[in-house]
Amino acid sequence: MCLRFSYSLSLPLLFLFFLGSIPSILTQQNEDPTIKTMQDFSGYPVVEPPHPFVSNSLSVDAQTLQKQIDELSTFSDTPAPSVTRILYTEKDVLARSRFIKYLMGLAGLSVREDAVGNIFGRWDGYEPELAAVATGSHIDAIPYSGKYDGVVGVLGAIEAINALKRSGFKPRRSLEIILFTSEEPTRFGIGCLGSRLLAGGEALAKALKTTVDSQNISFLDAARSAGYAKDQDDLSSVFLKKGSYSAFVELHIEQGPILEEEGVSIGIVTAIAAPASIKVDFEGNGGHAGAVLMPSRNDAGLAAAELALSVEKHVLESGSIDTVGTVEGF
Ligand SMILES: *[C@@H]1O[C@H](CO)[C@@H](O)[C@H](O)[C@H]1NC(C)=O
Ligand SMILES: [Zn+2]
């Protein structure tokens, strides 16, 4: 996923976002027509009573957060300003242990990891038996990407918890930060690998037993070399029990130009892209252009081009601008 964005994250808004279930805070801001309450977005009434928490005691340490983002970007296999951090490589493992788990520990969170390296940092609420509220994102980075992508959603979440702690806030529900393993499909061709397993992806858990990367290193060997999946081939231990979380919110950089073009610093999404892809092989026959004439030609490249254009045509005819059909390469 290509990163072109302006880093125009509004930090005060981060907290509205994080505490999005407090309708009173959001409705006060409602003179701005671009801001809607979670209730407007979801169509569901907000069932929890407003927390008697005073938001103006919060202060976000934006400078430290920016420094952490810069430092995490140095865990990279390509030179700055690019970032390349591929699943279970040395840099990924170091970024997890030396940086993310370390910061979670400093924030006083109890840290646990599952068999594929989803990392959970938990701040127990005063009613810890209630389902937790979670937030988080990913820190793997496609080759030559930028430094913000999912990182903002992980480091931002840690700073959000630090700010809440500094303010004296005590959560009723436990708050949990999740670092999701392999949002990017770079190494094994599977995107959102960690979160799909958490959601109980049985087919995926099974497929991962035989998944290899382009160097023929198996997923399980790679996971083991990073310290995960120790004695197990069965990844079903990663599946979460139903009802583990009461809410989840993710802060993420928009990987596109829409907010920037509209001059809006933050947006709340109501749905998210659900990518699906197919790989098609075309076989043809070579033939001299001077002697193999049109009736006998069987050109693989041209057939592929026709399919590519039909994909575009089909999607355009759907009339939906957010249905995107594209062809990655030949
Ligand atoms: C990949 O590794 C497996 C098991 O180690 C081996 O059987 C297979 O031949 C390898 N494939 C290639 C293309 O090297
Ligand atoms: Zn991302």
Image: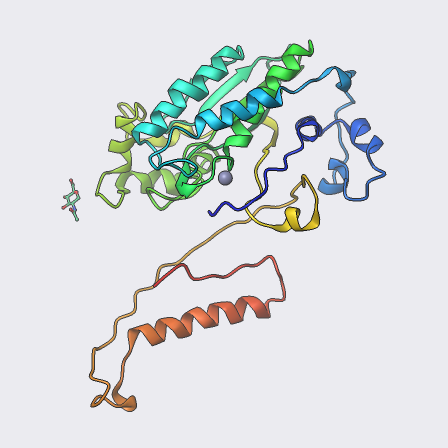
Snapshot quadrant of residue 235: top left
The answer to whether any part of residue 131 appears in the image is no
The structure residue drawn at horizontal position 44% and vertical position 24%, both measured from the top left corner, is: 119
Q: Is residue 213 left or right of residue 39?
A: left
Q: Is residue 128 above or below residue 12?
A: above
Residue situated in front as seen by the camera: 217 or 43: 217
Against 130, residue 147 (above or below) is below
The quadrant where residue 224 appears: top left
Ligand 1: which quarter? Answer: top left
Image quadrant where residue 243 sits: top right
Q: How many marks?
A: 0
Between 55 and 248, which is closer to the camera in this rendering?
A: 55
Q: Position of 214 compared to 275: left or right? A: left
Q: Quadrant of the C terminus?
A: bottom left
Q: Is residue 30 above or below residue 59?
A: below
Q: x, y percentage for residue 66? A: 55, 26
Percent across and percent down for residue 317 are 58, 70
Q: Which residue does the image show at 54% across and 13% down from the upper left? A: 107
Q: Position of residue 20 (x, y in %)?
A: 71, 30
Horizontal and vertical percent for residue 323? 57, 59
Tell me how the rendering is colored: rainbow
